[in-house]
Every structure is written in C-alpha cells, then in structure tokens.
Image (spheres, rainbow, N blue to C red):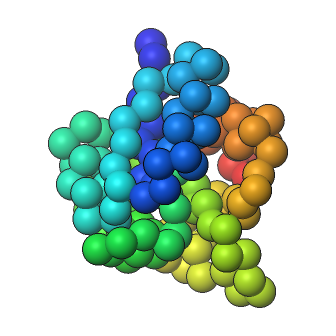
Amino acid sequence: MTRRILVVEDTVDNRQIVRDLLTSAGFEVIEAVDGAAGVALAGTSRPDLVIMDVQLPVMDGYEATRRLKSDPALRAIPVIAVTSYALSGDEERSRAAGCDGYLSKPFSPSHLLRMVRGFLEDDAPHA
C-alpha cells in the first residue's frame, strides 16, 4: 500500500525537490501552499505523514500543527517540521506545537527519507 504524505510548503522549488524525492521513493505526495490549506487538506485526505514548513503564509506551521494535533481524527498523524530559520529554541518550539520530528534546511535527502520511513514503520523509533 502506497503511503500518502502531505507536504505543506509555500516555495515552489522546495515543494518540487521534496515531491521528486518522495515520489521517487514510492510515496504518494499531496501538497498545500499555506498552513490553513494544509490543515484543510489533512482533514479531507488523511495523509500518513505531514512535512510542515514553519514559515508559511495565512497560518504558520506551528499553528497548523497545533490545529492538526487538537483534532482527534488527525492527532496521530506524524508531523515533521522543516525550517530554513534554524535558530536556538526552534526545535523546542516545534515540538511544543506538536511536531514529532524536526529538520533544518538545507537537509540531506537521505536524512529526510530515513526520518519519513522511521515514522511510517510501526516498530521504528521516531527521530
């Protein structure tokens, strides 16, 4: 069964890089360009995992994650925060919002794939 991953990212080039990486690894990718659209799409499509940019228009990734995690139907979906503004305390802030994983840009494609696979394998430890 193909796993579905929601990528919430406002930058076209970044979305394409992540889409190409994930689809070449056999994942189905759906996309949203802002936090509000990401929350709505998660509600209708029930992805297996969300890759959430932190700096987003309309609603930032922190608030979008809080909304996902406050919905009983969506709270079990792992969320990996991705940010290009990796400042001291950002990982803690992401985790406090409910993110299950954290990556700063630029990230290694192999590291992202390992993290994604880790969250999607039932017995794998979460990063």
Numbered circles on residues, count? 0
Residue furthest front in the image: 13
Residue nearest the observer in this picture, 46 or 18: 18
Compared with residue 38, is residue 48 higher up or lower down, i.e. above or below?
above
Q: Is residue 123 left or right of residue 38?
A: right
Q: Residue at x 58, y 62 (%)?
A: 81
**Residue 90's x, y, as percent?**
67, 80
Residue 26 appears in the figure: yes
Residue furthest bottom in the image: 88
**Residue 45's x, y, as percent?**
25, 37
Which image quadrant for residue 121?
top right
Figure quadrant of the N terminus: top left
Q: Residue at x 26, y 65 (%)?
A: 36
Compared with residue 62, is residue 30 higher up or lower down, i.e. above or below?
above
Compared with residue 75, is residue 111 higher up or lower down, i.e. above or below?
above
Residue nearest the observer in this picture, 110 or 76: 110
Residue 124 appears in the figure: no
Q: Is residue 120 left or right of residue 106?
A: left
Q: Residue at x 43, y 58 (%)?
A: 10
**Residue 92's x, y, as percent?**
67, 80
Q: Is residue 10 left or right of residue 113?
A: left
**Residue 86's x, y, as percent?**
72, 75
